Image (cartoon, rainbow, N blue to C red):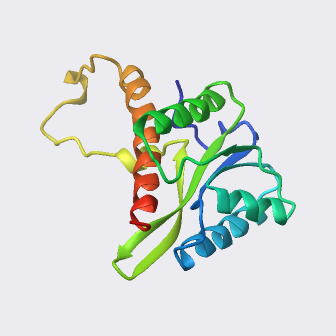
Amino acid sequence: TNYDRTADELLGLQCRMFVITADKGLAGSYNHNILKLAEEELEKRDDYKLFVLGELGRHYFEQKGINIDKQFHFVVQDPSLSRARRIAEDLLKLYHTNELDELYIIYTTMVNAMQEEAQVAQLLPLKKTDFKIPVPIDIPLEGLALKPSAEEVMDHIVPNYVTGFRFCVWCIGRSIFL
């Protein structure tokens, strides 16, 4: 599977924006910053599909008349790895079947106990430059035999990467309300 499509290999398909908000509006700027950033990102594109996790985000986009292609109800307050895995499997299936070229996640991260920051991260396609590890100069590249192949390794790593990243963001968001 080609998880590292180059700009030339992108098929001109839709981009998926996965937005994670809270179910309730009890965390000050937490939701406001995510929704503001999400709108800015959506304005940059005509070819997007919006996935929303969290009731507050769902209500916000519905009130604005912005189409939500898939929403996940009442799961923000009770994150589980099993749910994260099912959501990641759905997203990866769209990527494998060439129904999307890019996948971004919009979420909040904690800077410190008093400050959080909305961020956008590209989950797919992966960029080889993010994973470049220099090979020591004294090791001939011809002598490196990868078993299993790089493709087989990526087929196992990427689904776990998408699931883990998504689950981590979900749990961080949940911890703000504890």
Q: Nearer the viewer, residue 124 or 65?
A: 65
Q: Nearer the viewer, residue 70 or 2?
A: 70
Q: Nearer the viewer, residue 162 or 51?
A: 51
Q: Nearer the viewer, residue 94 or 170?
A: 170
Residue occupying image coordinates x 70% and y 46% = 15
Judged from this view, the residue extending furthest toward the left is 138
Q: Is residue 155 left or right of residue 90?
A: left
Q: Is residue 20 visible?
A: yes
- Is 31 situated above or below 160? below
- Is 154 situated above or below 39? above
Residue occupying image coordinates x 45% and y 32% = 159
Kindly indicate the quadrant of the structure image that contains residue 101: top right
Residue occupying image coordinates x 69% and y 37% = 100
User: In the rendering, at what x and y percent does residue 138 appear?
Assistant: 12, 38
User: In the rendering, at what x and y percent does residue 31 appear?
Assistant: 59, 70
Q: Is residue 91 left or right of residue 81?
A: right
User: In the rendering, at what x and y percent does residue 177 appear?
Assistant: 44, 67
Judged from this view, the residue extending furthest toward the right is 65
Q: Is residue 105 left or right of residue 149?
A: right
Residue occupying image coordinates x 72% and y 36% = 11
Quarter the C terminus occupies? bottom left
User: In the rendering, at what x and y percent does residue 137 appear?
Assistant: 17, 42
How many callouts does the rendering have?
0
